[in-house]
Image (cartoon, rainbow, N blue to C red):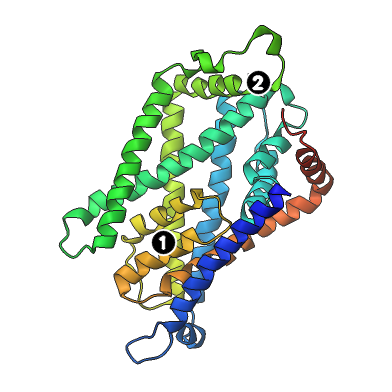
Amino acid sequence: MKKTVLFLLKMGLSLGILGFLLYQASQSRDEHGERLLFQLWQNPKDWGALGLGFLFSFLAVFFTIGRWWYLMRIQGVRVGFWETLRVGYIGYLFNLAPMGIVGGDLLKAWLILGKRRGETPMVLASVLVDRLMGLYALFFLASLAILGMGVLNDPGTSSLLYTLSVAVLAAWGIGTVLWLGMFAYPWYRSRLLQVPEKAKGTWREIPGKIVRAVWMYRHKPWSVAGVLLSSLGIHALFAISIYFIATGLWKEHPTFWQHGYISPTSMSTSAIPLPFGPYEAVLDLFYKDVTGKAGLGLMVALAYRIICLLIASLGVLFYFLSRDEVQQTLAEEQNGAMVP
């Protein structure tokens, strides 16, 4: 019952945000008084640019799954790349679908574990670090773009863009301190993670084991640095994808370099646990700030969502090929049996 109510609240809030953005877009007009939504429908599309947008998003998702595979290999988890790819696309599919049953990250970790239950802490640690590394890289890339382009010192920078830029830089700074703290202090020795002897062998051991597994990355600094660089490259691919989508839809849009901070800053709002809405809202704010027109960013964001669904079609294929395995996992989670 609680899951159903939470799901309905999330969907209601997401639909409310999208409804408001669509209303704004419907009222927005160009310099000739023509509605932008009608203009989008009538104007010829650059299908070559849209195809490049799909290609760069596909590559970004592919390398994201490869990053997770590499993080597991660092932990000593012997898993093949093809198996990781199969499970990764299934997880990507469930992350996109607001089913409210199980998160894509938890599902893919559970599917990878299979008969590897003895490697539970290592797999969960790889999922955690993969998610945190991706989020940190978003702020890192956006901060590099903001500083490199001199956004804060540009007199033409609007108050909205200035505020968002300062927030991104602050998030990057806080993230850097947290990462240094994570690898500088042996958290696994904390009293909060110590388990009484009588509780050994139960789920209460799991948090401490995961922290110890995360600590293992400290001994592979060059590997972690490589993962960070690959994460920056992945988000750069997403930014390039958004730029080509915008090029394919509109003649008027932010520049290639402006997407260096527009895309990662907007995507960082995906950390908010809503099926959709925050990303579309922030991207539309950025586009409106640059072009002065509401609705352009929303259309680009919706086109990007469609591309994500096309990529997730691979997840659909893998889902049906592994349907029994996935359904068993979902049933175990629903019955409260997904505590490794």
Q: Residue furthest right?
A: 324
Residue type at the position of mark 2: Arg
The residue sitting at 69% across, 22% down in the picture is 203
Q: Which residue is mark 1?
A: 282
Q: Is residue 292 left or right of residue 333?
A: left
Q: Position of residue 160 (x, y in %)?
A: 28, 61
Residue under the point 50% across and 21% down:
215
The residue to which callout 2 is attached is 204
Where is residue 285 shown, x and y percent of the image? Answer: 37, 66
Residue 140: numbered disc: none
Amino acid under disc 1: Val
Residue 237 percent across, percent down from the top left: 45, 54
Q: The C terminus appears in which quarter of the rendering?
A: top right
Mark 1: secondary structure: helix
Lateral position of residue 168 relative to residue 326, left or right:
left
Q: Residue 159: which quarter of the image?
A: bottom left
Question: Is residue 299 visible to us here?
Answer: no
Q: Which image quarter: residue 225?
A: top left
Residue at 77 percent of width and 42 percent of height? 334
